[in-house]
Structures are given as structure tokens and as C-alpha cells.
Amino acid sequence: MAATKRSTQKKVLLACRNCHKVLDGDKTICPECQGNALTPEWFGYLVIIDTRHSDVAEKMDIEFNGRYALKVR
């Protein structure tokens, strides 16, 4: 049985400058705020699974569950 070669490329993730939503690199428009200001320059990774009970989501004005960047350049 031959071993399969795994790709060593990193998946590019972009963050929206408007709402901080983290998106896959093939996106051109943010599905949450409809903005097109996406950047690969972001720091800190936050996953919100229940916005209604999250103090962090309230502080960051996050309305929807998902992946978010803490700081976006």
C-alpha cells in the first residue's frame, strides 16, 4: 500500500474589517455584514457558540454564532 502525500499548504483565513468574522480565503464578501473589506492580517481566534449567553459576544457586539478575530488590521 502506497502512502498518500498530504498537502503542507496552510488554509488561508480572512477576517472582515467591519464585523471581525473569520472566513475561508476563497470568499470575497462577508456573509454577515455584506462588506468586502477582508484581510489576512488579524490576530486572536474566538469561537462563539451561543451569543445569547456570551459576555464576550455582548462586549464585541456579535449577534451571530461563528468564528471571529479579536484584532483586525
Image (cartoon, rainbow, N blue to C red):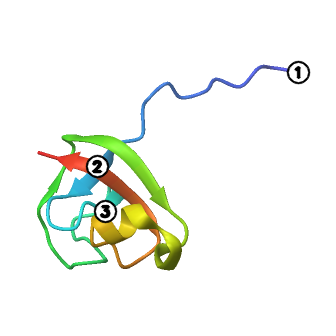
**Relative to residue 36, is residue 47 depicted above or below?**
above
Q: Which residue is under mark 3?
A: 21
Residue at image position (25%, 71%) is: 30
Circle 2 sits on which residue? 70
- Please, what is the three-letter code of the amino acid marked with disc 3? Lys
Which residue, given by chain and number where applicable, does mark 1 sit on? 1
Q: Earlier in the sequence, mark 2 or mark 1?
A: 1
The residues tagged by marks 3 and 2 sit, at their Cα atoms, a distance apart of 9 Å
- Which element is circle 1 on? loop
Secondary structure, mark 3, is loop
Looking at the image, which residue is at 55% across and 67% down? 49
Horizontal side, residue 34 vs residue 27: left or right: left
Residue under the image location 33 percent in, 41 percent down = 44
Identify residue type, mark 2.
Answer: Leu
Nearer to the camera, 68 or 57: 57
- Depth check, mark 3 against mark 2: the one in front is 2
x and y percent of residue 7 in the render? Answer: 53, 29
Snapshot quadrant of residue 16 = bottom left
- Disc 2 to disc 1: CB gap under 8 Å: no
Q: Is 6 drawn above or below residue 57 in the view shown?
A: above
